[in-house]
Amino acid sequence: MNTQEIPYKIYLEESEMPAHWYNVRADMENKPAPLLNPETLKPMTLEELEHVFCTELAKQELDDTTPYFEIPQEIREFYRMYRPSPLVRAYCLEKKLDTPAKIYYKFEGNNTSGSHKLNSAIAQAYYAKKQGLKGVTTETGAGQWGTALSMACSYFDLDCRVYMVKCSYEQKPFRREVMRTYGAAVTPSPSETTEVGKKILAEHPGTAGSLGCAISEAVEAATATEGYRYVLGSVLSQVLLHQTVIGLETKAALDKYEIVPDMIIGCAGGGSNLGGLISPFMGEVLRGERNYQIIAVEPVSCPSLTRGKYAYDFCDTGRVCPLAKMYTLGSGFIPSPNHAGGLRYHGMSSVLSQLYHDGLMEARSVTQTEVFQAAQQFARIEGILPAPESSHAIRAAIDEALKCKETGEEKTIVFGLTGTGYFDMYAYQRFNDGEMTDYVPTDEDLKPGFDSLPAL
């Protein structure tokens, strides 16, 4: 097809928006290992998960055979406020790089939360409301998930309690205030408000926190409060399921113009946006229909895929959550507060970990100065200020496009632009002032985390 026939932005019609979420586990020959009860070390049952999660979400978490889940009508109506999101051809970036590569990005920042997180937040809030709960608790790193959940809870008139990683709480006060504007209560984590928070502070005085710490506090708060359940913004299979609207729309838009990507790139922290973007394409790979180069990009300061161990580990620092088999740095690993983005989780989604372990995708890590160089370049050329998390994918996309310039290959690159960076100006300021530095953990730095892995 003549590329001139392809518009700058590909919008799907409202009728083309997905009516179902796609469960990639149904097509996986090697299923992700089950969550384990930390007390019995046996697979978690629905009854056990219901103490922590909403019942319907617990069912989704355990189901690895149903390929499609119908999206409830009320959620689809909410999605229509900002979905389908555009797939954009980065013509200006291609020209500036002087590359024969074709670059597309799926832009998820065109909603009031500023990121892809709203796709799952509204689903989880819906199921909580449907169950008759009073409210939910959660954690947030950079604040995008907390913002999205705050909005979703406001929409369904639910109470929302957010435990925000302490360094982000201090570095991103405006993100915190957006959450409070939507009615959420925001607590810096670790805190003195929970028993597990007190324990973490005693063991790590002055710690800037981590997602693992915040998860522990949020779970304790939920299980100790009648009428509340815990919800999570990444890692879990249920979250990846909801995020598949990203990949389903991306594939539909590409198919509409007969575009077949060579590579699909996403940033990777816990795995929600990456899993959501790649799932429909990975499904084709698993069914033997097509082959793609799929790349996960993570920070060198928290390199769970590239330097982690594939093992059962606790999902949280306080060890109150189930154990998941995943690529992990150990639940005792505390990421450097120097890292500017929200990709600060010690482990990776069990689904993505299994796919990576089976050699169906690759991973690479990048430094944050490289990331912000790419973010600045993208902002100046494409006119969108990207989130630090998204900029990990931008970095890899630019690198791949430059390789095409060297080789003359006309590859088609698709990456996920997961959100905007307008609440990350403290990090941008540090980069612009030349104060940003790179932290690369040594083997000795990683050892305490690995030593914390449970002996099963």
Image: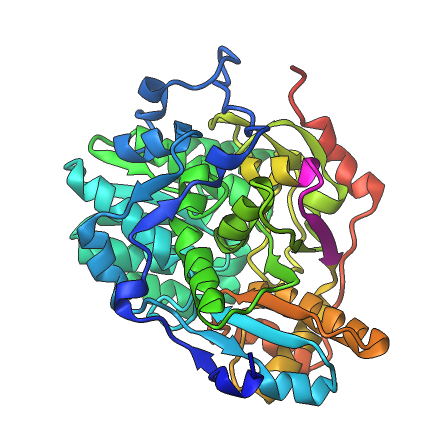
- Residue 127: image quadrant is top left
User: In this orientation, which residue lies closer to the viewer: 318 or 382?
Assistant: 382
Question: Is residue 185 among what the camera can see?
Answer: no
Which quadrant is home to the C terminus? top right
**Residue 74, percent from left and from top:** 18, 53
Please say if 342 is above or below 64: below
Please say if 375 is above or below 61: below
User: In this orientation, which residue lies closer to the viewer: 19 or 127?
Assistant: 19
- Residue 195: image quadrant is top left
Q: Which segment is the magenta one?
A: 356-365
User: In this orientation, which residue lies closer to the viewer: 166 or 366?
Assistant: 366
Which quadrant is home to the N terminus? bottom right
Based on the picture, tell me whether residue 123 belongs to the magenta stretch.
Answer: no
**Residue 81, percent from left and from top:** 25, 68
Q: Is residue 30 left or right of residue 181?
A: right
**Residue 108, percent from left and from top:** 43, 67
Q: Is residue 401 left or right of residue 159?
A: right
**Point 67% across, 47% down: residue:** 361
Based on the picture, tell me whether residue 360 belongs to the magenta stretch.
Answer: yes
User: In this orientation, which residue lies closer to the viewer: 361 or 329?
Assistant: 361
**Point 58% across, 54% down: residue:** 343
Q: Is residue 220 left or right of residue 422?
A: left
